[in-house]
Image (cartoon, helix red, strand yellow):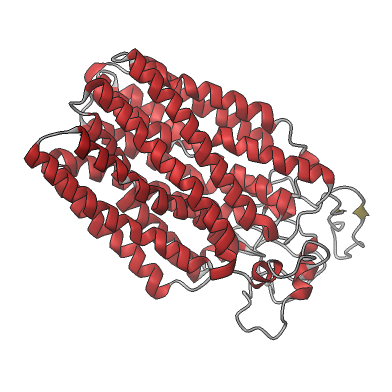
């Protein structure tokens, strides 16, 4: 990796640190739910409605956001705008929410806008990451991004929780941490050199990022195709959007050309592994999305100042454990494969819900105590394993599935959209179950639901680890030259969708 690109990669680590609290909006949404219930007198169903609107908005805008990131060469600018706007909406929520949902209609509008904006952050960060390190470097860099995300979230939530504890019952001031995080994101994001981002690598059309990829100008119009002209020092990136959703009539994708094109969105959606994985993402977040808010609320309600601090500790403990989970995923997913680690994360959720059911039942019978609340808080270690593994591995599996399609951000948008709609359903379902049936029954039902995606992944999802990723861990010189040249040509397990050596310069369809 050139010195300039290595510098940008290191700066990316710091961006991920500050972006942790902003990246998907869920951390602050969870904090907002505890704030609205304990300080503003919202009911669980009212908070569930806000969760639902936020998640539906993310779902609607996630795939378009990924599509935008696939063709734009202004990824840094788009990510910066998204960080600023989602911070603005968080501050508006904290400063304008009225007691007992007096202006809930306005809050619904704010959550809809915030959901659409935060949809741009995951594909923005990950497309910049892949544009700097390439598909070959994604495993280690995604692991580092997730570690820094979770570490940053832990620091900011700890700061906010201590502020809320000191200022109780006026706890809205805790959201001052959002502008602080946003300022860090903008400062360091602008220190990344745009020329260090290979936009063909960012969209998954080539394996390795190279700032020196030549730009290929399109042939002239007419029946005669003029020779391609290469302009040294620039990337072959088409900055106009592609509206070829269905594929040109008569296209023969089997013909290898010097200027390969990205798959159409319809071709991406025909990939059966992607469809299965998208369903698993949806089902996992349908079961898991509301467990953390329910735990936070069960600790906050009736415990006053200490309850707010315990709620913040729920996030802090889980995020610290997620740092370790992300590191383990980065180190061992190329050794043992994606599937083993992913299954570990998936099966953690039913275990966690079972333990929570037992502890809540004991607390209901014996009464609230610091010891029982501490045990309930400790279950967040399992959240750190489950959500931590999932958060890292779903990006890597999506990168595996999209290799060679030229639609990495679009594919990531699809899987993230499934997570968003799953979290949306979970948000309202979990809050409604807690209000109507109690927290114990809610945890039982969510735990049973969590078994479904784990079993689906175990029974039907194949291993997705690409051959070039596995090979790169064995060959110290893998980063030089064409990595595909070092893959065993006789291997029948090599993903047929991975790009060949001709794919080193490409254009959007």
Position of residue 331 in the picture relative to residue 275 (left or right)? right
**Percent x, y for residue 505?**
80, 60
**Percent x, y for residue 379?**
30, 46
Position of residue 358 in the picture relative to residue 61 (left or right)? left
Q: Is residue 468 visible?
A: yes
Quarter of the picture containing the C terminus is bottom right
Q: Quadrant of residue 104?
A: top left
Q: Is residue 236 above or below residue 458?
A: above
The residue at the point 90 percent across, 60 percent down is: 228
Q: Nearer the viewer, residue 341 or 76?
A: 341
**Percent x, y for residue 215?**
85, 52
Q: Quadrant of residue 402?
A: bottom right
Position of residue 354 in the picture relative to residue 119 (left or right)? left
Residue at the farthest left position? 365
The residue at the point 41 percent across, 65 percent down is: 343
**Percent x, y for residue 189?**
68, 33
Q: Nearer the viewer, residue 250 or 436?
A: 436
Q: Nearer the viewer, residue 376 or 275?
A: 376
Q: Quadrant of residue 434?
A: top left
Residue at the farthest front position? 371
Q: Is residue 119 visible?
A: no
Q: Nearer the viewer, residue 269 or 439?
A: 439
């Amino acid at each position: 990796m050139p010195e300039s690109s290595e510098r940008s990669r290191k700066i990316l680590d710091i961006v991920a640190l500050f972006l942790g609290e902003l990246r998907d909006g869920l951390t602050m949404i969870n904090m907002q739910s505890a704030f609205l219930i304990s300080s503003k007198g919202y009911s669980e169903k009212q908070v569930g409605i806000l969760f639902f609107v936020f998640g539906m908005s993310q779902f609607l805008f996630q795939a378009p956001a990924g599509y935008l990131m696939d063709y734009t060469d202004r990824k840094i600018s788009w990510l910066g705008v998204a960080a600023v706007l989602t911070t603005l909406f968080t501050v508006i929520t904290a400063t304008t929410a009225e007691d007992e949902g007096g202006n809930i209609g306005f809050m619904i509008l704010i959550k809809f806008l915030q959901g659409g904006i935060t949809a741009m952050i995951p594909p923005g960060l990950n497309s910049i990451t892949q544009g700097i390190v390439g598909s070959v470097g994604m495993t280690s860099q995604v692991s580092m991004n997730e570690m820094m995300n979770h570490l940053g979230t832990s620091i900011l939530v700890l700061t906010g929780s201590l502020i809320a504890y000191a200022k109780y019952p006026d706890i809205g001031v805790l959201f001052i941490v959002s502008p602080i995080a946003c300022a860090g994101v903008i400062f360091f994001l602008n220190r990344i050199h745009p020329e260090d981002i290979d936009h063909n690598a960012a969209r998954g059309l080539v394996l390795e990022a190279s700032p020196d990829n030549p730009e290929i100008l399109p042939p002239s119009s007419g029946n005669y195709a003029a020779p391609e002209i290469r302009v040294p020092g620039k990337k072959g990136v088409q900055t106009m959007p592609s509206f070829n959703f269905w594929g040109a009539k008569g296209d023969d994708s089997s013909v290898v050309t010097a200027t390969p094109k990205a798959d159409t969105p319809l071709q991406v959606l025909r990939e059966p592994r992607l469809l299965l994985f998208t369903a698993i993402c949806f089902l996992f977040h349908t079961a898991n999305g509301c467990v953390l808010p329910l735990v936070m609320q069960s600790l906050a309600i009736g415990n006053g100042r200490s309850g707010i601090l315990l709620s913040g500790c729920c996030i802090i403990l889980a995020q610290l454990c997620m740092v370790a989970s992300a590191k383990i995923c980065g180190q061992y997913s190329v050794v043992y494969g994606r599937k083993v680690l992913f299954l570990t994360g998936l099966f953690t959720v039913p275990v966690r819900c079972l333990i929570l059911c037992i502890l809540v039942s004991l607390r209901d019978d014996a009464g609230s105590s610091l010891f029982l609340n501490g045990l309930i808080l400790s279950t967040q270690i399992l959240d750190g394993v489950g959500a931590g593994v999932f958060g890292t591995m779903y990006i890597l599996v999506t990168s595996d599935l999209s290799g060679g399609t030229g639609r990495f951000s679009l594919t990531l948008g699809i899987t993230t959209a499934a997570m968003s709609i799953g979290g949306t359903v979970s948000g309202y379902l979990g809050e409604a179950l807690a209000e109507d049936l109690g927290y114990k029954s809610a945890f039982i039902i969510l735990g049973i639901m969590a078994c479904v995606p784990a079993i689906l992944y175990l029974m039907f999802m194949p291993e997705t680890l690409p051959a070039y990723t596995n090979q790169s861990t064995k060959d110290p010189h893998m980063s030089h030259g064409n990595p595909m040249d070092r893959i065993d040509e006789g291997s029948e397990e090599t993903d047929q969708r991975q790009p060949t050596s001709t794919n080193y310069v490409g254009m959007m369809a």
